Image: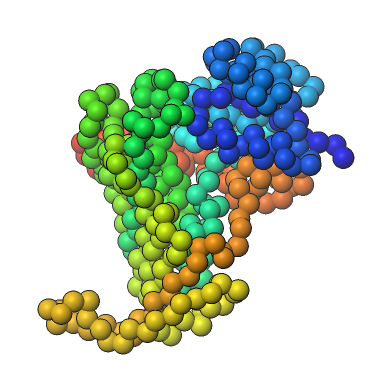
Amino acid sequence: MKKLNVALIGCWHPHIGRYYPVIQKREDTQLTCLWDTCPERGGEWAAKLEVPFVADYDELLKRNDVDAVCIISETYLHKELMIKAAKAGKHIFTEKAFTFTTADAAEVCDTVKASGVKFGIAYIRATTPAFALGKKLMDAGVLGDVNMARIRNGVDASKLTDLPPDWFDKKVSGGGAWIDLACHQMYLMDWLFGEPLDISANAINYYGRDIEDNVCAMVRFKNGTLGVAESSASPFYAPYMYELYGRTGSYLYRIDSDRGEIHVVADLLDKVRELLPGVELDVKLHSNQALNAEAGTTFDDRVEVTFPIAQLPVQKEPIDLWLDEVLYNAENPFGIDCGYRLTRLMEGGIKALSEKKTVTF
């Protein structure tokens, strides 16, 4: 079997551990070498992964044992690294963020499309089973018109030990809680809701650095959804929250829970069962119940369905989807246009934060 030769480009982003094991474990791929801006760090990773460290990126792209690159470098280098790889005919997978500006994103997109190389981007939550279920419920019409969504992501960055020293350098990373953490919320909303209308945002710098530590953004989408994205890099505890609210149903999930919740009008219970074959469903019927004792309004019959997240079907990771596209021309939903759309949302949020106004797309 001819294997696809993949090089790791950068050892900066802490998500590196999501990618090299995939390349090393698949029978049709192999990790052949790596490059990094820091020779010491690159050498340490090369020794760990038992591959050569190549100090010159341009020379790496000339190697016969490099068919594709997996970019995990400092974010400010993404544009240059992707353009050079595309011009060298190397297939590209990249960690988010894509680029800092839409102008840069457009240049990368044009170069990649002109080169004909296959491209993938790390929309990792879109392939996480509990998150993918939200889109499945939406696409099947179970939730009705989804007009409100809230996605929250938070970590205590002060306690993370796998971050590089320049992680909080705005020139290197592009920002803090918005540019890295909120990328997840933005690509999920792009994937779920499509074209945006406008964005507004606010933030605080808890640690007093030149990057945001807590941020909340609101995005209006052309399909009628208002998306609220919250990111924080300073809390003691902040589990991922994923909430989709529609006219006929809602889907709720928090990443530290082993169960998900679906709330739908009673008539849609059979549809829920069809969408979750083999999953053990705990079903409760709430008939004409008010939400609280003082409420004067009752509601249509509501079915509450809870289920074990572990029983949801496993999804292929974005890097596997990309590798399958390169090797077998399989469909990859997270291609080059996703990179541009993500940058458009991220740049809009940065502008909304800096100019203290709503930014129209």
Residue furthest bottom in the image:
287
Q: Quadrant of the C terminus?
A: top left
Name the one closer to the observer, 360 or 349.
Answer: 349
Q: Please provide percent x and percent y for residue 77.
A: 51, 22
Residue 289 falls in which quadrant of the image?
A: bottom left
Q: Please provide percent x and percent y for residue 262.
A: 42, 71
Q: Please provide percent x and percent y for residue 16.
A: 56, 32
Q: Is residue 318 visible?
A: yes
Color style of the picture: rainbow
Who's the residue at 41% across and 46% down the image?
186
Q: Is residue 345 visible?
A: no
Who's the residue at 61% across and 37% down the image?
19
Name the one closer to the observer, 146 or 168.
Answer: 168
Q: Is residue 242 above or below residue 234?
A: below
Q: In this view, does 139 lie above or below 123?
A: below
Residue furthest left in the image:
294
Q: In which quarter of the image is the N terminus?
A: top right
